[in-house]
Every structure is written in C-alpha cells, then in structure tokens.
Image: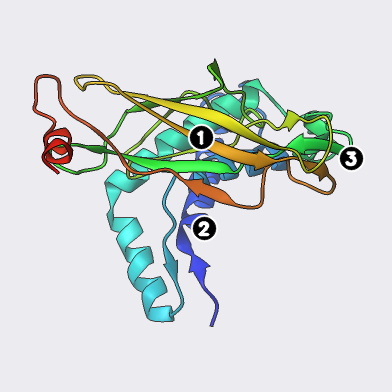
Amino acid sequence: MKATNLMEQFVKEQVDDMYARIKEENPSSPICDCENCRLDVLCYVLNRVPPKYTVSSRGVSHTQRELENFKQISADVGKIVMDGIRLISSSKRPNHNSSYATSLEKLKIIKQRPFFLFPILSGYVYDGLTFESLVDAQISLFIDGKLAKMLDSTWQNPCKTFKATEGAYNFCVLPRKAMKANLTRDFNILLKVEAEGYESVNYSFTVPISSIIAKDSSGFANYSLKIQDLFLFPKGAENTMERYIAEE
C-alpha cells in the first residue's frame, strides 16, 4: 500500500484552473505561467494547507467526494492560490525560464561554507474561548529582535492564517553565516500574533542551533520545530487559561 496525499492533486487542479482563468480573462496579463512558476505556486499552497492522506481506494473515493462537495475548502484554497500566483510572479526565481534554481543558489550560499540552518517553524493559532482555528491572524517572526528574513519569496513574514489551513502557519528562515562548523548558538525567537478584535499575543523561546557545512542542502535543516499552540482571546474577554495557570 502507498499513502497518498489527495490535497496535492486537488491543489494542482486549483492552480491549473486559476492560471487558465487568468489567461482567458486577461490574455495580456504579466503573470508568468511557466512550469517552474507553477511548481512554486503549488509548493506555496501545499505548505499552507493540511494534508489529507489515505491508503485505500475506498478512502480515496470518500476524500475526493468530500473535497468536491466542500465548497468552503475550494474557496479558501483558491484565495491562497491567487496569493501565491501574485507573489511568485512579482518575485521570480533567478533564471527561472532556463532552470529551476535551488535555494542555495538563490542565497549565494557557497558549498563548504558553515551556516546555521534553521528548522521549519510551524504551529497553530486558536480562539481562546471557542478553541476553533483562528482565521486571518497575522503572525510575525522575530529573531534576536529583528524581523526574520525568509528563505525565499514563497515564504512570508509576517504570514496569515486561512480557514483552509485550520489556523496553521509555517516559517522557513534564511540561514545565517557561521565562523566555523560545529558552533552552537542560541537564537532568541519571538512570535507576535495579532488578529482584528483580539488581544495580541507575544510568545518567546530559545532555539539552540549548531553550524554545519552547507553541502547539497536545501537551505534549511532536515527537521521541523513544532511550536506550542497559541490562543488569542477577544478583547474584553477573560483569559481563563491564565487564571487556570495562576491557580495551579
């Protein structure tokens, strides 16, 4: 048996459909629809929506029917696709018409050079009263007091949550140069989460990272770091979680 992520095919169809609609409605649009740009958009969307895996034919049929009938998912994914198309078209990869440049080439990272490679940072934002996923929350990532630069234009900082992503967010941070390999440094991380009508939340923690030689690397560490769930409360509402912690 083979595990299949049905969201991949669903998103690919959404991406192809959106490009076709743009081309039909505005043939002179400056938006590039080459294979490399389409792949960038596909990755942009898949990094922002939850997967739907199945291993059986029955599961495939059930999930496909669920996706076809769930109009809200289609609408939310469509919005993320359009955001991705605008972003990718405004910041194309170097030499994107001739070859698919790697992240290391884009960053001008020289092999045999030591770097601090960050893990992919991911987490979820919820409403503190209903425990439902929070939509349109803005998450900003700061490292050592400065807004962190991302690996490339397909990752945004600040980023937003969508209904289709179920309150999820992800960051892929630009590597930092190191003096030599096998150095361990603590990076101070601060997440600032804001949403209209809610009290903002700041969450800070420290991540120790060891420098390595950048060789045949994608520009980020081969692991991800799951950040604890973050809860925002409507303005004026009592934060019962803080009260519970104080009583404990």
Crowding at dot 2, Cα within 10 Å, few <14 / some 14-19 / many 20+, comes out as: few
Crowding at dot 3, Cα within 10 Å, few <14 / some 14-19 / many 20+, comes out as: some
Report the residue at 50% width, 29% height from top: 189
**CB contact under 8 Å: marks 1 and 3:** no
Name the element at disc 2. helix
Residue at which label 2 appears: 9
Q: Is residue 102 left or right of residue 29?
A: right
Report the residue at 75% width, 40% height from top: 211
Mark 2 or 1: in front is: 1
What amino acid is labelled 2 in the image? Answer: Gln
* In the depicted structure, whether residue 211 falls above or below residue 66: above
Q: Nearer the viewer, residue 141 or 79?
A: 141
Q: Is residue 119 left or right of residue 247?
A: right
Rounded to the nearest angstrom, the CA distance separating label 2 from label 1 is 37 Å
What amino acid is labelled 1 in the image? Answer: Thr
Q: Which circle's residue, 1 or 3, is located before the other in the chain?
A: 3
Name the element at disc 3. loop
Report the residue at 41% width, 61% height from top: 52
Q: Nearer the viewer, residue 182 or 199?
A: 182
Q: Which circle's residue, 3 or 2, is located before the other in the chain?
A: 2
Crowding at dot 1, Cα within 10 Å, few <14 / some 14-19 / many 20+, comes out as: few
Q: Give the quadrant of the C terminus.
A: top left
Q: Nearer the viewer, residue 106 or 219?
A: 219
Residue at which label 3 appears: 111
Rounded to the nearest angstrom, the CA distance separating label 1 from label 3 is 28 Å
Rounded to the nearest angstrom, the CA distance separating label 3 from label 2 is 35 Å
Residue at which label 1 appears: 206
State how the image is colored. rainbow
What amino acid is labelled 3 in the image? Answer: Lys
Q: Is residue 158 left or right of residue 73?
A: right
Q: Where residue 218 sits: x, y (%)?
A: 74, 45
